């Protein structure tokens, strides 16, 4: 009997909602589109975190969501909301059962670890199918301060979910995976030291170069009251202490005293409301309300996203920690000059002075250094263009999703070979 399906590829992230978009969601959507074009049937199975619809189609990709909980006693509504936003170790028996029963699965692709990753592992073993894991950062290469912030909602809480972690083999996910994919070079180097097998590879994120190639940046400026001759500095990322927008504000404040005809926009969902409040306090205290805007996050399919890149003169990513930095690829594809932190995956992504400028977010004079680099780019429009053109060439030559998707397919095939050896036959 011929299958009705060409072969399901089930992607499993912790959450997947268009209104709370980030780099991981972009990666899943774009590789799913590539797989769909190649004739496979990619689907996203995830939790109901931050969502209201059980079933949805995003960018042509079916999304199924399932009830979930955080198995800790004493969690407040605020604690649960914080974990929904970032880093919650959730449990979803209904999601596991759906994976276990899903017909005609080619491969499971986990985009999370802990209990959810364990559910993927166990469902794959139940079905005798291969499973791969993508490390989007925050596993081997994560600062202690960021880890502490993620764990704060469960501080002094009693966990009742440990038996489920043991049942699903949560601590065995990376060791048992048929392939482990690292999106950051620094994460890859540390994973090699920690894991006992060599079933892992570095696969960078990608970008839809054609999507970001052109847009009406003038319309974006007009909409938000940014004059055509202002130097417009842009940051697009979660409003979160990891993304370090406070440093950008400090640097911009210094710049603005010398270059009053400058403007800054911070665009992104607020994953840490208290941190967002600190940013607003800084803006008010330094009388920057007329030249700085905090704007909500934009859906991946919102034309305003591409317009924002084309409206700006310089894109700045001052993160304390960054596994990869997909927004840099988007800025490059729009031909924009980039300033970014010399951390994590960014260190391997950017060539200082050629495709962008580096800054040290931990330096005592970081704000002054950032202000100086911004001022140089104001004085030298030719340099802005040179950096932007070099970035565009880099994105087109190495990071288009079509190239990344082909590399991922080869890793899937290796995972299938590994699973075949595990189970003694082709899965």
Image (cartoon, rainbow, N blue to C red):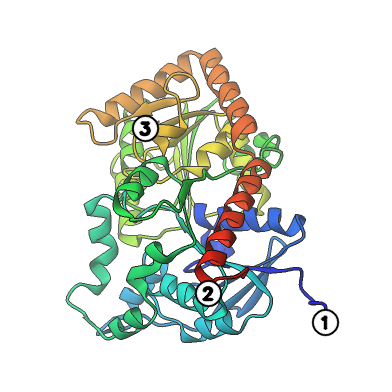
Is 275 located above or below residue 163 in the figure? above
Q: Which residue is mark 2?
A: 124
Q: Which residue is mark 3?
A: 252
Q: From the viewer's perspective, is the residue at label 2 or at label 3 nearer?
A: 2
Give the CA separation, mark 2 to mark 1. Answer: 23 Å
Q: Is mark 2 in CB contact (under 8 Å) with mark 3? A: no
Quarter assignment of residue 71: bottom left
Disc assigned to residue 1: 1
| Mark 1: secondary structure | loop
Disc assigned to residue 190: none
For disc 1, the neighbor class at 10 Å (few under 14, some 14 to 19, many from 20) is few
For disc 3, the neighbor class at 10 Å (few under 14, some 14 to 19, many from 20) is many
The quarter in which the C terminus is drawn is bottom right
In percent of width and height, residue 184 lies at 43, 44
Does residue 9 appear anywhere in the picture?
A: yes
Q: Earlier in the sequence, mark 1 or mark 3?
A: 1
Does residue 256 appear anywhere in the picture?
A: no
> Is residue 424 left or right of 253 when viewed as pictured?
right
């Amino acid at each position: 009997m011929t299958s009705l399906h060409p072969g399901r590829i089930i992607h499993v992230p912790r959450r997947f909602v268009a209104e709370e978009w980030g780099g991981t969601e972009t990666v899943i959507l774009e590789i799913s589109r590539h797989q769909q074009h190649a004739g496979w049937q990619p689907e996203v199975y995830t939790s109901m975190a931050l969502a209201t619809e059980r079933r949805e189609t995003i960018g042509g990709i079916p999304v199924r969501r399932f009830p979930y909980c955080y198995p800790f006693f004493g969690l407040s509504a605020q604690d649960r909301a914080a974990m929904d936003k970032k880093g919650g170790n959730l449990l979803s028996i209904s999601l596991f059962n759906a994976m276990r029963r899903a017909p005609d699965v080619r491969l499971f692709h986990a985009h999370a670890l802990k209990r959810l990753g364990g559910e993927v592992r166990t469902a794959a073993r139940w079905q005798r199918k291969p499973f791969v894991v993508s490390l989007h950062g925050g596993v081997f290469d994560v600062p202690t301060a960021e880890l502490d912030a993620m764990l704060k909602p469960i501080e002094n809480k009693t966990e009742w979910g440990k038996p489920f972690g043991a049942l699903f083999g949560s601590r065995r996910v990376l060791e048992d995976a048929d392939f482990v994919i690292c999106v950051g070079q620094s994460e890859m180097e540390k994973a090699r030291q920690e894991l006992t097998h060599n079933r892992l590879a570095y696969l960078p994120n990608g970008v839809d170069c054609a999507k970001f190639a052109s847009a009406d940046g003038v319309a974006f400026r007009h909409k938000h009251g940014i004059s055509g001759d202002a130097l417009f500095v842009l940051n697009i990322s979660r409003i979160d202490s990891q993304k370090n927008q406070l440093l950008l504000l400090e640097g911009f404040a210094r710049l603005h005293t010398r270059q009053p005809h400058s403007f800054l926009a911070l665009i992104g969902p607020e994953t840490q409301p208290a941190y967002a409040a600190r940013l607003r306090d800084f803006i008010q205290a330094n009388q920057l309300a007329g030249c700085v805007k905090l704007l909500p996050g934009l859906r991946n399919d919102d034309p305003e996203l591409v317009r924002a890149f084309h409206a700006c003169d310089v894109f700045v990513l001052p993160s304390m920690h960054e596994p990869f930095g997909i927004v840099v690829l988007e800025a490059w594809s729009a031909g924009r000059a980039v300033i970014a932190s010399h951390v994590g995956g960014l260190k391997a992504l950017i060539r200082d002075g050629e495709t962008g400028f580096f800054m040290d977010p931990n330096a005592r004079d970081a704000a002054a250094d950032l202000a100086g680099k911004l001022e140089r780019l104001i004085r030298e429009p030719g340099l802005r263009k040179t950096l932007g053109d070099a970035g565009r060439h880099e994105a087109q030559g190495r990071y288009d999703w079509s190239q990344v998707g082909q590399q991922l397919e080869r890793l899937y095939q290796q995972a299938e070979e590994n699973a075949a050896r595990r189970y003694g036959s082709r899965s």
